[in-house]
Amino acid sequence: AAKPGKGAWRNPAQTYDYVTKALGDKKIFGRKQAIAFFEEGIGKLTGEARSDLLLRYADYLETYALADEARVDALVEQAFADKELTDAQKIAICRRAGQQGNWSKAEDFAPRALTYAGTNVQAQAGIWQWRFLGNRRQMTTRQYTEAFEAVLNDKALKDHIFAFRGLVHSYVGELIYRREFERALAWLDKVPEDVDARTRQSFLAQRAELHQKAAQRYFDKPDPEDLKLVITTYETIIAEIPTNRPRDVIPYQVSIAETALQAGDTARAEATATETLKLIDQPGNRESHQLFYVLGRLAYEAEDYAKAVTILEDAYGHIRGKPGNFPKRREMVEDLVRAACAIGDYAKAADYADDLLELVRSYEKRRYQTYVEGLKKRVPDAKAKM
């Protein structure tokens, strides 16, 4: 009954989706209401919206054992029976249905989607990509690589897999996650030189991610050789960005500064961070926050604690109390507290230590609480000496 401009507006499909989800988990009365809304929505909606709701209804009945298998199968067939739906729309419906339960239904709907794809190679590649999302965590590395590479080496797809980068990109990403770095690198080495700029940039960024993760393989400290390869890869990306898009280089310059800091190349880290900050207009955005952390950390490691406090306090002031997952927020506050302690400013350290308590993980709170309480006990002594 909602009208545009009168409270939160949802179109009918969104409304039925919202209401059935809200009621669906409630027992007895809620389930009766959910079923009533499902059936009402199916009667009123058309096209893809109706098909989506039919599949959600079938899944709901199956999940809570509210109907037999024949009834569930009939609803699924009904969802795809609309003659007005194109094959592309049916594939999209299969994808959304497979996405339910964190892709737990992907295997149920992928074969059907492949029949709708026919000889459309691009559609096939997309379907295989989300099909593997559903069962990748249930497969061993050997099972996963054998199954995925069988698809990548299929005659129909083999000549097109890099044109539709999503399939290979997804596979390489999973290999990196499983720490199969050599196999992942072998696939990245197969990327042709003549792919479009966007595809090449995407694979280069993935190569940098690979070396970043590989740097942590065997050493307490990151492997400097892998970190050099990370920086080299980002430099390659920057070199290929058109000169009329200078701000596009900022994220990669930030990554170079952070990697140089990690590698112990303090001169490179400081120079890159300082130069990149000149390209950023907003002092409180994510990139500037990361760069100020690099500069503050460099000052801290050089034992110039007063400078570290100045840089970190100014940078943290832009985001203090703001929501959002700012990278290095916790590390910034922790270094700020330690630097303030190093110069004997315990009042300032105690002030920021309260923020630190909100950022640490739950299992760390007790230890940090003891640290903060000890810090606050030193504040009166520090004031007395002043």
Image (cartoon, helix red, strand yellow):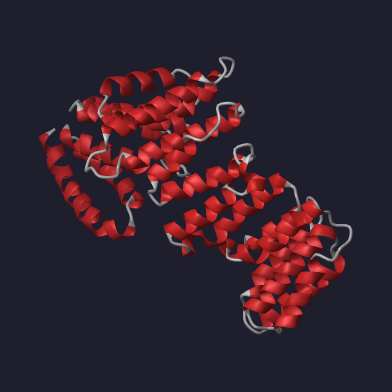
x, y percent for residue 257? 36, 27
Residue under the point 64% across and 47% down: 155
The answer to which quarter of the image holds residue 351 is: top left
Residue under the point 34% across and 41% down: 214
Q: Is residue 258 left or right of residue 105?
A: left
Direction right: furthest residue: 83
**Image quadrant where one finds the C terminus:** top left
Task: Tell me: residue 40, above or below residue 324.
Answer: below
Task: Tell me: residue 52, above or below residue 72.
Answer: above
x, y percent for residue 163? 63, 36
Residue 291 visible at all: no
Q: Is residue 285 left or right of residue 226?
A: right
The answer to which quarter of the image holds residue 266 is: top left
Residue under the point 42% across and 38% down: 209
x, y percent for residue 157? 64, 45
Task: Tell me: residue 380, above or below residue 99.
Answer: above
